[in-house]
Image (cartoon, helix red, strand yellow):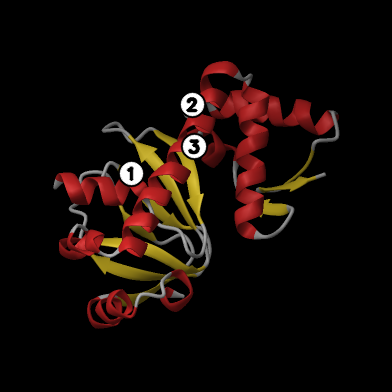
Amino acid sequence: MSDTLFTDPRLLDEIRRYARVKSVKRDTILITPGEEVLFIPIVLHGVLRIVRQNEEGKEIFLYHLYPGQTCAMAINCCQAHKESIVKAIAEDDTEILQMPVNLVEDWLKYPEWKFFVNNTYAARFAELIGVIDLIAFSNMDKQVLHYIQERAKAAGTKIISITHQQIADELHTHREAISRLLRTMEQKNMFRLGRNNIELI
């Protein structure tokens, strides 16, 4: 994957020397808020889900990372020497390339790495603006639909295994409200609800 992302032989040589490949099982939590950021993850295979979590444990879904992508939050925390402010979860069995944090800034001397970092900031910023717009300007049904669609896209299927409580937790609302809304959306033929699963129609 690094060979397809980058072509500079000097950068590739450093990646091969210092980066490490790590395989993680589905639902594995890679990092939580408050933990030290020890590496920058670039997804090789699979998907990571990035969630914002406050001190009380309340969460809100931010975005997914797909192959070839990394987390702008991790880069920012690394450059600012701050602890993680997000939680990263493996959406599926996932393989990541662990880029050492102490080399992130040094590698900015390579144009390809600098472009990769800047492009990551731009892409994740656009996704965060989309999340903010959904929260600030959309009804809850649009937020739920967006969330289910994103989870289904990450899973590569129209049927996802998820509970109403899990949706409520990551959309920062009450389970009862989500259950009522899902039943209403099912009546509108947007979803088909099963036992701990939801099918997009």
Sequence order check, earlier mark of 2 and 1: 1
Give the image location of residue 183, x and y in percent.
75, 30
Query: Judging from the image, what secondary structure is the residue with disc 1 in?
Result: strand
Q: Residues within 10 Å of mark 2 (few under 14, many from 20)?
A: few
Per the model, the C-alpha gap separating discs 2 and 3 is: 10 Å
User: Could you tell me which residue is drawn at 62 percent across and 23 percent down?
Assistant: 140
Per the model, the C-alpha gap separating discs 2 and 1 is: 16 Å
Q: Marks 2 and 3: which is nearer the front?
A: 3
Give the image location of residue 65, x and y in percent.
48, 55
Residue 2 image-quadrant placement? bottom left
Location of mark 3 (residue): 126
Q: Marks 3 and 1: which is nearer the front?
A: 3
| Kind of residue at badge 3 | Ala
Q: Marks 2 and 1: which is nearer the front?
A: 2
Query: Judging from the image, what secondary structure is the residue with disc 3 in?
Result: helix
Residue 167 to residue 44: above or below: above
Give the image location of residue 145, x and y in percent.
68, 35
Per the model, the C-alpha gap separating discs 3 and 1 is: 17 Å
Q: Which of 163 and 32 is in front in this view?
A: 32
Sequence order check, earlier mark of 2 and 3: 3
201 left or right of 95 in image: right
User: Could you tell me which residue is drawn at 63 percent across and 32 percent down?
Assistant: 144
Give the image location of residue 41, x and y in percent.
35, 62
Q: How crowded is mark 3: few (under 14 residues within 10 Å), some or many (20 or more)?
A: few
Q: How many marks?
A: 3
Location of mark 1 (residue): 86
Sequence order check, earlier mark of 3 and 1: 1
Location of mark 2 (residue): 132
Residue 13 to residue 128: above or below: below
